[in-house]
Amino acid sequence: MTINRPALLTDHYELTMVSAALRDGTADRRCVFEVFSRRLPSGRRYGVVGGTARLIELIRDFRFDPSEVDFLLRTGVVDEAAAAWLADYRFTGDVDGYAEGELFFPGSPILTVSGGFAECVVLETLALSVLNHDSAVAAAAARMVTAARGRALIEMGSRRAHEEAAVAAARAAYLAGFRFTSNLAAGARYGIPTAGTAAHAFTLLHDDERAAFASQVATLGKDTTLLVDTYDISQGIRNAIAVAGPELRAIRIDSGDLAVIAQQSRELLDSLGATETKIIVSGDLDEYAIAALAAEPVDMYGAGTAVVTGSGAPTAGLVYKLVEVEGRPVVKRSEHKATIGGRKVAVRRHKPTGTATEEVIVPQGVPDRQPNDRMLQHSYVVAGEPVSLPTLDQSREHLRECLISIPWEGLKLSAGDPAVPVTVVPAD
């Protein structure tokens, strides 16, 4: 059995519902499911939609191969009728949603999946797995980009994530404005610029630090980055410049009090004539640590664990809920988990200057359009066929423009109200 096929991202309970719905005749009822978040993670003022393009590709290829169907039938997960249905599965419905890179807030209907009940419900785990992960990483990365104030960031967290999640995280970080990734698979798959330098192991391999630096420079030239904190940082910088000369592109520091060390390192580099040599810092950096270094002579940040784990919010808190059956709104009334029935349409309202002022969500209707409104939903799949998607670079630019559009208070790292208030207009 192939373990990475998207069809296996189906939960047991989803197939229980498929089997029962096929048996009682409700499997083909026209339904609408929506993906949204009831609340933002603590301390966050916006969410970022990430992973949409990945999800659409996975839906396009979503199939159950014979070995998977056999497993499900043999283990009693499905009956014969459901097994036959799964063997022929193709999604034939529609998918609409917010643009990848769009900001979202509590209640924003960021993805709408419509079609027969069974064909939509089997996509729940897949949709939430992709969107919750990528959106969490993109939101954390966007906050780091804001904190960096124009300085470059490199994503380097692959060793802190599942091998496939590492690639997806690199993509989400680039979407949010990171300039590079150290993940070569992400570079090959998505065209993301890659960068990296030798680790401490390479320095320890050699008889002394100078020998390690000399080997790296001989191989890669002076346009490389030397890791200078294996032993003594000041001596490491002296060794780096002695070997590479003042034309060395950059040094990297991965430990210690980075604020103090960055100042001292800049002074030492300048005294050695290496006034153009850049300083890259890394070592468990999150948005708060990056913000704390804003006044220091740092040229680039390397972020790893924090970015690939959503910087304390490893999931975006998105849910996938049924809101309409055969044109009739349906609602869940559970305490603290109530839903609003009916398919939603959403617009982002702006001042003439371009500043976002409100998100308006209308169930079962069409919003009263005003000047400077922007419709938030786009078609991604029509009758089972994917439509053209923006490129990753276009989505990256879209997020940059969205962050510019929200009030400056919305970019604060401190807790506060959502950057843009959300208004749900009652259905007629």
Image (cartoon, helix red, strand yellow):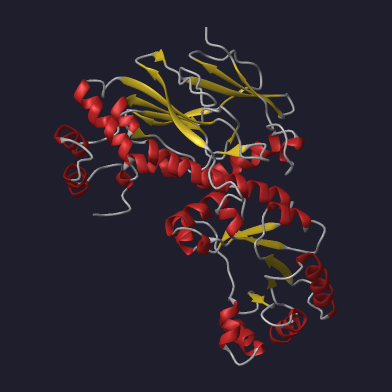
| Picture residue at 38% right of the left edge, 43% below the top | 57
Question: Can the viewer see residue 391?
Answer: no
Question: Can the viewer see residue 63?
Answer: yes
Q: Residue furthest front?
A: 335
Left or right? Give the position of 91 relative to 263.
Answer: left
Q: Quadrant of the N terminus?
A: bottom left
| Picture residue at 78% right of the left edge, 68% below the top | 262
Quadrant position of residue 84: top left
Location of residue 398 in the rendering, given as x and y in whole percent from the top left corner: 59, 39
| Picture residue at 41% right of the left edge, 41% below the top | 55
| Picture residue at 16% right of the left edge, 45% below the top | 74
Left or right? Give the position of 110 relative to 223.
Answer: left
Location of residue 368 in the rendering, given as x and y in whole percent from the top left corner: 59, 12
Left or right? Give the position of 32 relative to 340.
Answer: left
> Viewer-proximal residue, 268 or 191?
268
> Viewer-proximal residue, 18 or 377?
18
Q: Residue furthest top?
A: 428
> Looking at the picture, does residue 395 appear above or below residue 4?
above
> Viewer-proximal residue, 127 or 186?
127
Left or right? Give the position of 192 relative to 400.
Answer: left
> Looking at the picture, does residue 130 appear above or below residue 3?
above
Location of residue 325 in the rendering, given as x and y in whole percent from the top left corner: 36, 17
> Looking at the picture, does residue 65 appear above or below residue 344?
below
